[in-house]
Image: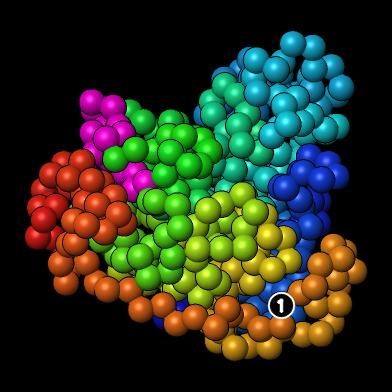
Amino acid sequence: MSESVAVIWDDSMGRYDFGRGHPFAPVRVQLAMELVRSFGLLDAPGVEVVAPHSADLEALLAVHDPAYVDAVRRCSGGDCGDDHAFGLGTDDNPVFRDMHDATAMIVGGTLEAARRVWTGQQQHAVNLSGGLHHAMPAHASGFCVYNDLAVAIQWMLDNGAERVAYVDVDVHHGDGVEKAFWDDPRVLTISLHESGATQFPGTGWPGDVGGRAAAGTKVNCALPAGTGDDAWLRAFDAIVPPLLREFAPEVIVSQHGCDTHHDDPLGHMTLTIDGQRATAEAMHRLAHEYAGGRWITTGGGGYAVVEVVPRAWTHLVAEMVDQPLEPDAVISQEWCDRATELTHITAPTTMGDGRSPQPKPWAGGFNPDDPVDAAVMATRQAVFSHHGLDPWTEP
């Protein structure tokens, strides 16, 4: 596949920082970008590194309520008052100086990615700092202040897009993006996540399929805690490709939170880097198969800041620039030393976890006694008929 890729990055994006000890540490993105560079991926043919501009108020207000944006701006200057009602000043979303500007820069990055792909300037674009999928129209949630993904999708809709598909593979339900487009049939949201019975935010059930005018365009697969590579990839195969095929999106946006990994301190899934690498490969293939190659990606969750995040997202960028890395590729000693210097955590030495996922294709049959298969079938039964698909027979 011939690629042209925009990699959105500027050191100023590290200003999105909730402070010492908070899991959403900017060092994880910094180390990911340094690992990307160490493999020469930014020098691959067709790659352009793009510094973003902050999203302006018009872009933010296309998704977020004016009162909420005003509250964020007040808190950014130290005048928070009673703004806890907006989800600000909590343990998850502590207030920090210049929070509005720092978050608007993240939004501007994903917005620039969308502009470049939608206008044909590049086929693919990635903003590893983005993926703030929990932010709601009127309040902060789950480490997310403004919803960069929703703003970018809304911009494409306002500029002529008629079918946008959003695929979320974070361990947490992509609730904020779903909420923003709950009643909009032009946006297909698919979220595969750990069940809300065991994971924040406690939402994302199979029966949550969208508003009346958009029924079937909001898709949730709530997987049991402990789901690993093979079962997770089987679930992905059973849900994502057939729905993308029928929806025929003009562009695909995907959020690649890597907190599904077995080492993640906030998740309860058991995926490996190898399973996450296979997911990135699948998304790349599907973008070319069903969206003419138009693919926008972001980071997201992921709290094993040295052991997982840099490797998972380097594989994502490598896949996007058509320079995939082998799992046994050796990580440079220079990067390992840098990671340890910044975090006091011993870094991994290779790009894989020694697994070779072998998922059974869904077409081989459904096992009602398997909890993952049962979760997948619940989702298929809830949404497939809205797309003219048979949940029992469709491969």
Residue at coordinates 46% horizontally, 34% vertically from top-left? Answer: 202
* Residue 266 pos. (x, y %): 61, 49
Q: Which quadrant holds residue 22?
A: top right
Q: Which residues are magenta?
A: 207-222
Give the residue number, with chain letter if any, for mark 1: 348
- Specify few, some or many for label 1: CA neighbours under 10 Å numbering under 14, 14-19, or 20 or more: some
- 355 or 225, nearer to the observer: 225
Q: Quadrant of the N terminus?
A: bottom left
- 281 or 112, nearer to the observer: 281
Q: Quadrant of the C terminus?
A: bottom left
Q: Is residue 211 magenta?
A: yes
Q: For residue 297, say whether it is visible.
A: no
Give the left or right position of residue 75, taking residue 266 as reference: right
Q: For residue 44, say whether it is visible.
A: yes
Q: Is residue 131 above or below residue 261?
A: above
* Residue 34 pos. (x, y %): 76, 71
